[in-house]
Amino acid sequence: MHELSVARNIIEIVEQNVPKDELPFVRGILLKVGEFSGVVTDSLKFSYEIIAADTELQNSELKIESVPFLLKCNSCGGITTNNYGLRECADCLKTDTEVLSGEELKIAEIILEDKS
């Protein structure tokens, strides 16, 4: 299960970037997941909950924001998408494209409880 490894990595990244005494105050982690990142978001959330249950992040929630697949065509200049993750421009059908979004998997935000 690939998502289990991803969940472990998320927890490690949070533990490396939040001071140890503030870890119990982490309430949320916003993760941006591209449509064609290869991650099953329901499985990732479930895996995160299981792993976080025995850590100082047990009161945190993994929030997932889906990022659409977008291409920029270097031939016609159009920005398009498709439902298959193909790197072909939907306007001119050329394959001289670059992926703008849709393959990412990154932590965008770590949300801490206000201690005041």
Image (spheres, rainbow, N blue to C red):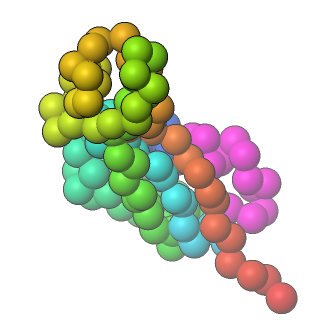
Q: Is residue 21 left or right of residue 40?
A: right
Q: Which residues are magenta?
A: 11-23
Q: Is residue 114 left or right of residue 116?
A: left
If the image is split into quadrants, where does the C terminus sit? bottom right
**Residue 14 lies within the magenta run:** yes
Q: Is residue 101 visible?
A: yes
x then y, percent, for residue 89: 28, 24
As displayed, is residue 27 above or below residue 79? below
Q: Residue furthest top?
A: 96
Q: Is residue 29 left or right of residue 34?
A: right
If the image is split into quadrants, where does the N terminus sit? top left
Q: Is residue 50 visible?
A: no
The residue that appears at 75% across and 64% down in the rendered structure is 22
**Residue 4 lies within the magenta run:** no
The residue that appears at 45% across and 17% down in the rendered structure is 74
The residue that appears at 46% across and 49% down in the rendered structure is 32
x then y, percent, for residue 112: 68, 70
Q: Is residue 21 left or right of residue 3?
A: right
